[in-house]
Amino acid sequence: GCKNRLTCNIEPQSIGELFAQLPTEIDEIDFQVLGWSEENKVNRGVSIRLNPLAAYCQIHSMDEFWFHGKIAQINKFFAGRRPWYAGLRANIASCASALLVVFLVATLYLVYGGSYSWAALAATTQVGLLVMMDRVMKGKLFPRSRITLSESRRGLNKDVLMVLFTAIGALATLIGVVIQLWPKPPH
């Protein structure tokens, strides 16, 4: 088995045996399934590597029918398990960078206008965005792949709460800027 190891190599004979030998928490999995010819030579195979930052799949075979069938099967499997943010993940860094610039300008504008509490909120939102981007780049928030071996309850965790509070801070900063820009009634 692989209990309490940083790295483990196993060679199961079945899927059931594979899952019986895996630890309860996995950060990365790399596996290969090979098909053998009657001459005891490898004639087809699938290699998959999954971790929070990347997902790789390689398929090889001399049998074109098997090759295309396996690609379709694997694509269908992964397409049915895509996270809700999969289409947005490629744009997260550029959007966060643009938001950092907007909040920097908002912070400077609010400081210049004398609204120090709103400026502090804008600056705090920038820090939240930076922390969020650090977590995204490390694969802790919005990972490219997540390996789940057992059913877990979905709910609020610290990453979701951080994104939620950053969004609330961004909204509050926007309200502060609007209040500052709102025309003052004549006296």
Image: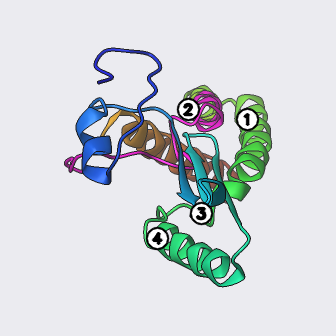
Q: Is residue 131 above or below residue 93?
A: above
| Image-quadrant location for residue 182 | bottom right
* Residue 113 circle label: 1
| CA distance for labels 4 and 1 | 55 Å
Lateral position of residue 19 relative to residue 179, left or right = left
Q: Earlier in the sequence, mark 1 or mark 2?
A: 1
Q: Is residue 157 visible?
A: yes
Residue tagged by mark 4?
Answer: 77
Q: Main secondary structure of the magenta part?
A: loop
Task: State which region is magenta.
Answer: 127-154
Upstream in sequence: badge 2 or badge 4: 4
Disc 3 marks a residue whose amino acid type is: Ser
* Amino acid at dot 1: Gly
The mark that comes first in sequence, 3 or 4, is: 3
The tag on residue 37 is 3
Which of discs 2 and 4 lies nearer the camera? The answer is 4
